[in-house]
Amino acid sequence: MASSPGSNAALADQKGTHSEVSQAKKSQHAEEAIFYKNCRAAYLTVFKSSLENIKSKEQLTLVLQQAGRNPSQKTINKYWTSQTTTLNFDDFCTILKEETPAAKTQLLEAFGKIDTDNTGYILHDELYKLLTTEGEKMTLDEVNAITKLPDFNCNGKLDYKKFCDLYMTTSEQCCRTALEKLEADDRLRHRQFGSEAETSPEGLTLPVSKPSLKILRKTDHRPAPTKGDSRSPSRPAQSCKASSSSTISVCASSNRSTNLIEPSTMKEWQCAQSKGCFYLEEDGEIVSHKYRLHLPQRSTVCITIKPLHLRQIEGKSCHWLSVDTALYVLKENETQENLQLVCFTDQQNKEMFGWKGELPSGVYWLLPFTTGCRLKKVKTPITGEAKLVYRDEDGELALTKEFRAALLDIFETIDLDGNGLLSLEEYNFFELRTSGETCDEEVWAMCKENFDMKKNELTRQGFMDLNLMEANDREGDPSDLWVTLLSLGYNKALEMTEACPFVIDICAEKCKPRIKAIYLEAGSWQLNRAICKSVVNKGDAKVMDGCENIIVYTYRTGMRITSVIENKSDNKVIVHVNNEQSRNCLSNRGLAVFAVEVAPKSMMVRIYCLAI
C-alpha cells in the first residue's frame, strides 16, 4: 500500500522528534556522568574509598570545599543535624546537587550592596564591622586573614573584584586538582566507570566484576574493587622544598624489659575473643578490622593480640606468623570522634603482644596495628599457577585439594567469633573485601535456600559450595576465584603472603567483656594520633643537632622501635634517616637511607624498625 505525502511528513516529524529526545537523553546522561565523576574526585581527596562514610561536620566541610563549595555553618547544620551520625557518598552527591557553587556575578552583587558608590573597594573598617557583627559572625583573626593578603588589599581597602577572581580561581583549582588525581590513578578511574578490565601485577587479567551472593537476585553488579583499588600512596612527596635538612640515625638496641606477665588466676577470669586480619594493598597501605569493646564495670583486664595459627601445610610457608602486631585501646567519651588513648600492647611474650591493667566501665575502641616491616610487597618467583578446579569422572566441576585447604584457612580467618559458622555480619566483611558489596537479609535468606546453614549461619560446606557455584557460573573459568584469593592476600601458588590473620583475647577479672568487629578499613587519623601520643608519652625525646625546633621521640619496646618527628617551626623540613650502621634493624621503608617531609607545626610517625 502506498503512503500519502501527508503521512510521510508526519512520520518524518515523528522521527525528528524521536532523534531530538534521544540526543537530549544522551546529553543528560553525559552531564550526569561528569557530575558524578566530579563528586567522586572530590570525595577521594578526603577519603580512601567511596565506601567510607563522612563522620563529622569537619569532614563534611572539608569534602564540600574540595568540590568547590564554600559552605557556611548554617549550610553544614542544615545537613548535619543533632540526629546525624554519618553521611555516605550518595548523601554527598545529593548535597552537591542542592548546594551549587556561587557564581562570580553573585559574589560581585553581594559586595556591590556594600559598595554603594561602585568604587570597587571596601574599607577595612567597614569590612570588620560587617563581618564581625552581622550574619554568621567571623572573629577578628579570621577577618585579619583576609585583609592581610597583599594580592587584593592596599591602603586599608579591599579590592573585592580581585578577591572574587582569586576565590573563583581557588575554587576551580580545587575541583581541577581532584579530577586530575582521579584521572591519573588508573585503579580509581576503572573502579569509577567499570568499563574496562585491569591487569594485576602478576599478569592475571581480572574480570570486570566478581559476583557476590547478589547473583541470586539476577541483578546487575557494580564493578568489583580489586586489591588496593581506592588507595592513595601514604608516603609524602619528597620533591617539595624545605627550609632545612637534617639527618638522624636509628639503632635497634632496646633499653626496656617488656615481658608480658599473665596472671596465674587467668583461668578464673571471663574472656572474649575475636579474630581479624591485616590486608596489604597495592600501594603498601594496610587495611584491618576495627573493634568496639564494652566493659560493664571497672575491672582488671589483660588484652593480647598475636598472629593466628592456621593449619600448616607441608611445603607452604607461614609468612604471616613473623608479622609484628599491636593493639591501641581508645576510650569512647561523648562521641565516637572524641576518642582518648588509654593504653597499648607494649608487653611481649614471643609473638604475642599484650597489656594488663585496670580499666573503668564503658565503651572502648580497639585499633590493630602492624608496622609493615614484615608485611610488605615482596616479589617472589612462582614456578606455576595453582589449579583451583577440575572435572571429575562424571564431567562435573570440583575444587582441588589445594584450593579446598586454602578455603578452609580463609573460613577460619573470616569466622571472627570462632564458632565454626559465618554470620551475615562476618560474611559481609568477606564480601566487602572481595567484591566491594554487602548482602542484606533478603539475599541471605535466598542463600539459606541454596547452601548449607545452621542457625541462620553459613557452614564450612556451604562456604565451599558457594565458591564451587562461582566456578560453575563461569563454566570452570577460575578468574572470579582468583579475584577473591588475590584480594585476601594469596599469590598464584596459593600462599598467603600479603595478609596476616590475627586473634585478639580480652580477659577481665570482674565482668564479662564484649568485643565486636565494626569496620574493615585502613589506619585512621585516630590511630595515627594514638601512635604519636604513645611514643611522645613513653619515648625518649632528643632535639636534633642544629635544629632546636625539630624533636625526635623514640620508643623502644621488645623488638619494635617507633620514632615520631615533631616540627615546631613555621617551615617545612626534610629529615634524612640513616639506618646503615644498624645491621640488625629492619625498616618498614625497606631502605637503609631515606627522607621524610614534616609539615610546619606538626607531628608525624614515619619510622618503624624491628630488631631481627
Image: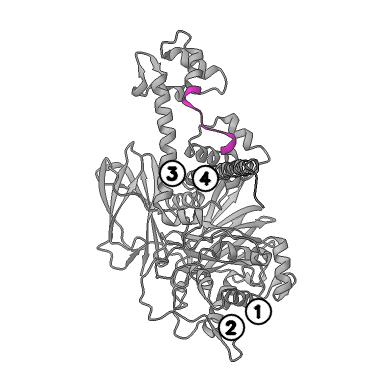
Residue at 61% x, 54% y: name it: 364
Q: Which mark is residue 30?
A: 4
Q: Earlier in the sequence, mark 3 or mark 2?
A: 3
Of 138 and 219, which appears nearest the observer? 219
Identify the residue under disc 3. 178
Indicate whether 314 appears above or below 137. below
Q: Residue furthest top?
A: 117
Identify the residue under disc 1. 461
Q: Which mark is residue 397?
A: 2
Q: Earlier in the sequence, mark 1 or mark 4?
A: 4
Q: Which residues are magenta?
A: 96-106
- Can I make out residue 92 in this image? no
Q: Amino acid at mark 2?
A: Leu
Q: Give the distance between the C-alpha atoms of the residues marked 1 and 3, in whole angstroms.
A: 46 Å
Quadrant of the frame with the C terminus: bottom left
Query: How many C-alpha atoms fall within 10 Å of the one at disc 4: few (<14), some, or many (≥20)?
Result: few
Q: Give the distance between the C-alpha atoms of the residues marked 3 and 2, in whole angstroms.
A: 47 Å
Q: In the image, residue 59 lies at what x, y percent?
A: 53, 41
Query: How many C-alpha atoms fall within 10 Å of the one at disc 2: few (<14), some, or many (≥20)?
Result: some
Q: Earlier in the sequence, mark 3 or mark 4?
A: 4
Q: Quadrant of residue 231?
A: bottom left
Q: Amino acid at mark 1?
A: Gln
